[in-house]
Image (spheres, helix red, strand yellow):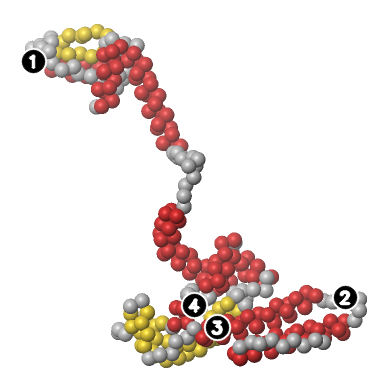
Amino acid sequence: MTTTTIAVPTSCAALCTKLAEPAQRIDDEIAQAGSGAAVDYGALEQRVADALGEVERGLHAQVLARLDIDVPAIRVWGDEYRRIGRAESDYHTLAGTVRVMRTVYRKTERNGATLDPVSVRAGVVADGWLPYTARAIAHLIAQGTSREAEATARELARLPYSRSSFERVGHEVGTLFRRAQPRIEEVLSREYAVPAEAPVPALATRAQARRRRRGRDRRADGAERARAGDARWHAAGRGGDPILPRAPGAHGLRRRAECGLADRQRQRGGDVQELGVVPDEAAGRAMEVCERR
């Protein structure tokens, strides 16, 4: 067997040992299987995934530990926080959960909020979920139910978490997105260039379409009646202003206007004169006055 020496940081020496041990075991199993014998490669794949997952978790633990800040006080977003102690905390990765020692700070006010620099610097979601891990969980939740997401993750040998964790993290990611949605949409609308040939859609509900169609039919019907000379008007015998019906062609409204005008003129002692059929030009003016009213 050929041995290769590589240079790695001292902190990663233990990870190299973890990777070398399963590699040696796999090599021994292949040698024992002999030439031409069948191999349970499914079990082999699982062992490789487990070994790589252990290395991945160890690497995450080392990187997260280096993000810690252990000083008497820090200032975050303009607020001052003072150190209250150190304790281990769980951080959830794609390959599983790791425990990291980190410093905890409290805001300098009565019952102030606590904060740990590791979570702030890494962009942790909720209670220790690393950003890409939370994104992967939210993606699976968007494809189906939490039970389906859990089963999919189990088959992929990733995200070894329970159904309740999938639901909780999915809701947390949704809350963060809704909080940032106005800013995201503003940036997208400002940066997106609409093509010149893009069509402009005009949408209307079925009820609105019916109302518009009835309105067009009524206007067309009124104009047709006015052109046919069906719009009549009456004026006082003393030269008063003409009284036009609200809707030309609406017989009931026209009759009420005629009766009311006649009664008022009789009370004032005047004569009611019917001027006959309105010509086409006058009918057009009558229609315009009616529409303005």
In the image, taking residue 281 as reference, residue 55 lies left or right, namely right
Mark 2 packing: few (<14 Cα in 10 Å), some, or many (20+)? few
Query: In the drawing, what numbered circle is on residue 63?
Result: 3
Question: Residue 206's spot in the image, x, y percent?
Answer: 46, 37
- Which residue type does callout 3 highlight? Val
- Which residue type does callout 1 highlight? Arg
Q: Which residue is mark 2?
A: 38
Query: In the drawing, what numbered circle is on residue 120?
Result: none
Kindly report which numbered mark, 3 or 2, lies closer to the viewer in this rendering: 3
Residue at 65% x, 67% y: name it: 152
Say whether disc 3 or disc 4 marks the residue closer to the N-terminus: 3
Q: Quadrant of residue 268?
A: top left
Say whether disc 4 or disc 2 marks the residue closer to the N-terminus: 2
- Tell me the distance, in whole angstroms, between the alpha carbons under discs 2 and 1: 118 Å
Q: Which residue is mark 4?
A: 122
Q: Secondary structure at mark 4?
A: helix
Q: Secondary structure at mark 3?
A: helix
Q: Which residue is mark 1?
A: 268
Q: Nearer the viewer, residue 270 or 38?
A: 38
In the image, taking residue 293 as reference, residue 160 lies left or right, namely right
- Which residue type does callout 4 highlight? Ala
- Tell me the distance, in whole angstroms, between the alpha carbons under discs 1 and 3: 101 Å
Question: Residue 91's spot in the image, x, y percent?
Answer: 53, 81
